[in-house]
Amino acid sequence: MCSGAMIEADGLTRRYGETTVVDSIDLAVREGTVCAVLGPNGAGKTTTVRMLATLLRATSGSASVGGHDIRRNAHRVRQLIGLTGQYASVDENLSGRDNLTLIGKLWGMSGKRARARADQLLTAFDLVDVADRAAGRYSGGIRRRLDLATSLVANSRVLFLDEPTTGLDPRSRSGLWETVRELVADGVTVLLTTQYLDEAAALADHIVVIDQGRVVADGTPNDLRGHVGGRTLTVRPRRPRDLPLVQERMAAALPEALSSSRGGVRARIEDIDGIQPVIDRLAGLEIAELSMNDPSLEETFFRLTERPSPFPAEPAIKDIP
Amino acid sequence: MTTRAAPHLPAGPARATAGAGFRQSLALAWRSLIQLRNNPWELADYSIQPVMFVLLFTFVFGGAIAGSSDGYLDYALPGVIVMNMLFVTLYVGMGLNEDLTQGFFDRLRSMPLAAWAPLAGRILADTVKQAWSIVLLLGIGFLLGFRVQSSVFHVLAAVGLILVAALAFSWVTILIGLLATSPTQTQLYGYSIIFPIAFVSSVFVPADTMPDWLQPIAEGNPVSTLTDAVRGLLSGAPFVDDALASLIAALAITVVAVPICLTILRRTT
């Protein structure tokens, strides 16, 4: 593993009896970057985070946060990290303000200092209006904001976000993304788990795709797209009756050409030079659309985790009048 | 390895100091108490329910059991105080279970706290709740005509003895809270234990009025010895043997339950 990483895991493994939930995961997250651990339900994401956050002991392998071994130096790791769980881990019987004040006191602040910090965070996270209401009565999005604010009471330099936007509406979701970006701009290191590709692509510098406890791919969002290889060429004639002709001519250059349900023909194309023969053959036909698309992350993901895609791999077609 | 990674972030002590742990316990005790602001039912449980028991037992059963309400109050009040202690203590286990099942315990464990602070905080808060209930019950008793026949020191000793017993019984409820899968289940298991041990004792009636087969159980029940000790302390009757027996029982429960609880807590990691 490369050294110098803020979060580093080396062969991290967790077994429950015969079942291996996390199987020898390697990770290296540089300071001030976001690493997304992406995977379907039950892939071992939460177990991985729980081990890194010192909540769960690894069966084998090792990991460190900020240079401190998670097992031998758990107490020091805990001084560096903030954790926001998949299930909002705030005290539902306390108001938002009291939750934040309590956490401040537990971090060793005086009562006065803890209350001032709580006020600061309530303002920063737009929680002032609900500050004195019991957290159990908050909506999902507000509760998640409080949960995140609670993780930030001590200005933690490393944040673990376990499925931070699961169950949130789109607005709360993009608000949370914005917050994460601001934190990272301040130099915070973030490890987040998600089942959403767009979330990983939007936030992460580095994506680790895991499935059934194993890393199946690892790289930047672009690396992962490249992993699948090829791009998709779509050609749509202006007149639908030209479709068979378009398909016939495209197939001559690209054997995989298939007509799509939306009045166009699609073909996988390995490199950009492959497009010229297609264009030559289409001469004389009125074409409404000709587009090249990267494989979607969805395609990539399902290919990597070897599951049938529930989404037809079809690029959005823009109508040209 | 701890020495390899470059951004070796400066960190504080390798473990929480005792002083820090104590302050954390106080903060968590404060938390358990201010929870009552948003959970008034719990407060009603410590306040209305015991008062109801005193009133019902004194005025409904008192005549039948002791010939008169007044006469029965002297007998029953110490019993109700002890029984109420058991019910209030159940909140230690319920609160812990709530923290475990709702993820708040994970948040606490991800922070640099003394490992014992979360439990100590709960037990500390419980002590305050217990004291409140005892004072309330003695006050109601006084209004209804109950009179302490001994000294203020005896009363303090009785309160102290109940608090020690509560401390020991806390560990039983912590054990229940660790094994149950929800706060409601914790309450259910708790009630299934507390009702029999409270009623098969000298809390409401003398053990020698029970059938022969039940008497030894009732007499050996630590709830009986504790109740008899409190009765003795408040009425000026002999109490030393019962008080000692209660302390030994408390010690025994603690010695058995604490290692079991800590082992289970550690196993959850």
Image (cartoon, coloured by chain):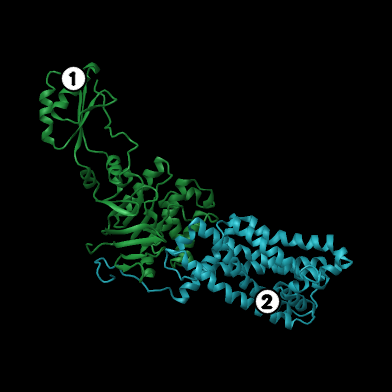
Q: Classify residue B71 as left or right of residue A255.
A: right
Q: Position of residue A206 (x, y in %)?
A: 26, 52
Give the class, few, some or many, for how many residues have Cα within 10 Å of label 1's Cα (few <14, many ≥20): few
Choose between A221 and A117: the one closer to the eye: A221
Disc 2 versus disc 1: distance between alpha carbons? 96 Å
Label tally: 2
Residue A155 visible within the image = no
| Chain A visual colour | green
Choose between B152 and B210: the one closer to the eye: B210
Q: Position of residue B176 (x, y in %)?
A: 59, 64
| Chain B visual colour | cyan
Query: Is the N terminus of chain A in the top left, top right, bottom left or bottom right quadrant?
Result: bottom left
Q: Which mark is residue A224?
A: none
Task: From the image, tell me which residue sits under label 1.
Answer: A245
Q: Is residue A283 above or below residue A7?
A: above
Task: From the image, tell me which residue sits under label 2.
Answer: B161
Amino acid under label 1?
Answer: Leu
**SS of the residue at dot 2?**
helix
Choose between A308 and A65: the one closer to the eye: A308
Q: Position of residue A197 (x, y in %)?
A: 32, 44
Residue B199 location, quadrant: bottom right
Give the class, few, some or many, for how many residues have Cα within 10 Å of label 2's Cα (few <14, many ≥20): many
Residue B187 visible within the image = yes
Residue at (32% x, 38% y) in the render = A309
Residue A28 location, quadrant: bottom left
Question: Contact (CB < 8 A) between labels 2 and 1?
Answer: no
Amino acid under label 2?
Answer: Leu
**SS of the residue at dot 1?**
helix
